[in-house]
Amino acid sequence: MREIVSVEQMRRMDAAEIERGTSAAELMRRAGEAVFQAYPWRDGACIACGGGNNGGDGLVLALCLQKAGIQCRLLLTEEPKTETARGYFLACKEQGIPWKLFNGSEDFSKDSAIADCLLGTGFRGEPRGEAERLIREINQSGLPVVSVDVNSGQNGDSGLGKTAVRSQLTVAVGSLKYGHFLGDAKDLIGSLHCADIGIPLLPERNARLIEQKDCAALFPERLQNSHKGSYGYVALLGGCIEYAGAAKLANLSCAALRSGCGVATLAVPQGIAASVSPYLLESTLFPLLDDGNGHAVYNEAQLEELIQGKKAIGVGMGWGRSADNPQILSYLLERAEIPLLIDADGLNTLSKMDAEKLRHRSAPTILTPHPKELERLSGISVAQICSDPVGVAEDYARRNGVILLLKGACTVVTDGENTYLVNRGCAGMATAGSGDVLSGVLTGLLGYAEPTAKTVACGAYLTGLAGELAEQAGTPISMLASDTVAQLPGAIKLIMKP
């Protein structure tokens, strides 16, 4: 796992290092040199600089290129505003490095690459004026772009950037930041390199990036002398007449089995059981009493039977909005002393219930909302959630005593104290049923793995990796959720590689 910090945490780290005796000029020198070493520069490099310290990093880069005998030029939106950057600007002029102020349009035809040093991590909002125009010119140039620390125009915490530089390479300076993964990051950053410039992490609670090796412990070598009960019985409760989706529901239970549980039981209203049954080859079917219209009704005896002997239960996928759903969910919250995963219509049902039911649970509860579902749960707008996904998720999880998985291009998983980012998945997973597959995988893992935030994060990693393999085998346009399920064995095999 790699540590990830917020912009404010990085600011405190910088300040602490300066307080220890490292000058701001020295830190800027290290940053510029790190960018120089991160890319195979050649003659014709254009270094686009703003007036802040991000621009100062670019000025140091120019000095490094000059020293290495690599021709470069400086393109400034304004002259440096900070004392440290002004010192390096003077050095560039003394070395005879060509420079000019951007005047609204630029000819990049003689350049080999562009270093983007316009706006740093302190930038907020949308770029305006010369910065906005230059960002558009850079994106239209067709040249390789190397962004320094964050892509100009992108928020360093949320990753959002309506008008932002698209880079071939982004060199994170000092530490990885939230914005390197969240929001628009995958659409803006080609590849990411983190340059260590000697600024140690502070003893704070940081988010961590889940990597392949972190997930390997979930899949130890299995004993020959074992049986299906060794890996847990799980239940998946969902479906209704409007969302019968027989094959889709079968994918849900298949995903649970593919992720390693011993037995998956799919509980659906008896009115759709007959249509689902032919698709269930290995899972067991548990028909629930319904209202005659394909919606499950509350029946305590059935629910007690369903959860008997189970290691975990997932609820809400394709559930619809039956009048009995709140009673069913209340029973599970109050009586199921096992990990409970709530997704989709289960979350919509929960949003209309008393949150105290969550807080009073002793067994782990896992919620898997997308931003709109979290808006319904928390009362915080989608815009606010997307502007601070880590902070909002941590606060909600902490206050309600849950493990929260916030879906997005990069997934946030937190229990309020331990926070993980999962940067796996692909555009092809933006299709019906992908959320159900994730719920199936997570419920399956909870059949035999510890119900922790890390387990949930690793389950999201596994699902995202399987989705990537599925996209590689086809195209993002034609990809189905079942393609992700089919790639789960391959994804697990990759994770298990030493």
Image (cartoon, grey):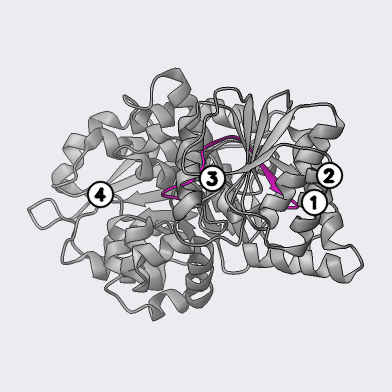
The amino acid beneath tag 2 is: Glu
Q: Are marks 4 and 3 in contact (CB under 8 Å)?
A: no
| Magenta-highlighted residues | 160-175
* Comparing labels 3 and 2, the label whose residue is closer to the camera: 2
The amino acid beneath tag 4 is: Gly
Q: Mark 1 to mark 2: distance in Å?
A: 6 Å
Report the disc number at residue 459: 3
Question: Which mark is first along the chain, 1 or 4?
Answer: 1
Q: Which residue is mark 1?
A: 90
What is the secondary structure assignment of the residue under circle 3? helix
Q: Mark 2 to mark 4: distance in Å?
A: 68 Å
* Comparing labels 2 and 4, the label whose residue is closer to the camera: 2
Q: Is residue 162 magenta?
A: yes
Question: Which mark is first along the chain, 1 or 3?
Answer: 1
Q: Is residue 239 magenta?
A: no
Locate residue 145, reporting x and y percent: 59, 33
Q: Which residue is mark 4?
A: 318
Q: Quadrant of residue 484?
A: top left
Q: Which residue is mark 2?
A: 94
